[in-house]
Image: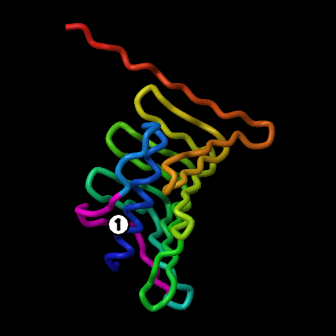
Amino acid sequence: MTTSMNKIVFICIFLLLPLTSLAAPELSSENRGPVEVTSDRLEVDDLAQTLVFIGNAVATQDDVTIHGDRLTIKYTGEKREIEQVVAEGAVRILQGTRVAIGERAVLYHLEERIVLTGSPEVRDGDNFVKGQEITVYLNDKRSVVTGGAGGRVNAVFTPKTEEKP
């Protein structure tokens, strides 16, 4: 995998997580470790311009891990610029105490937007948010959670208590 692809896989993994902290973390992938991707099978199709990691796909970089049944990277051109990264099937993204789950997560690289669907939920300790769709706008450091037709957004934010000496 090229360095450009490694950075995009990392961005996909790392940037789904800001939803739980309500303040986006540093977005830079500079000075990060290598991305390790494991799966039961890898299919590379240069005509379709895709890399598909199939079966128990796990991508890890530093303290961030994404699990899914399938991880597809769509690229374009001779430089293999990443257009889209799709994680599908029992998607679970972990970083420390933060966990994002859903059936599908899509990073739209050019738009710098991530969409998590399929009963998406983001948790950090007792705090959580659920909806029909969770969208993270990377440049704006903001997120939108929609409840869908007739559905509602559900969120719980637990205040931090001060510890007494």
Q: Position of residue 26 (x, y in %)?
A: 35, 51
The residue segment tinted magenta is 28-45
Q: Is residue 26 left or right of residue 126?
A: left
Is residue 152 covered in magenta?
no
Count how many numbered circles sit on residues in the image.
1
Q: Residue furthest front?
A: 140
Residue at which label 1 appears? 38
In the image, 43 versus 138, the foreground residue is 138
Q: Residue furthest right?
A: 150
Q: Position of residue 142 (x, y in %)?
A: 53, 46
In the image, 131 versus 15, the foreground residue is 15
| Colouring used for the render | rainbow
Q: Position of residue 97 (x, y in %)?
A: 35, 37
Label 1 Cα neighbours within 10 Å, binned few <14 / some 14-19 / many ≥20: some
Is residue 31 covered in magenta?
yes
- Residue positioned 49% across, 89% down in the render: 77
- Residue positioned 27% across, 63% down in the render: 30
In the image, residue 61 sits, relative to residue 77, either above or below, namely: above
- Residue positioned 43% across, 47% down in the render: 17
Examine the image and state in which quarter residue 163 appears.
Answer: top left
The image quadrant where one finds the C terminus is: top left
Q: Position of residue 55 (x, y in %)?
A: 46, 65
Q: Amino acid at mark 1?
A: Thr
Examine the image and state in which quarter residue 56 appears.
Answer: bottom left
- Residue positioned 28% across, 50% down in the render: 63
The image quadrant where one finds the N terminus is: bottom left
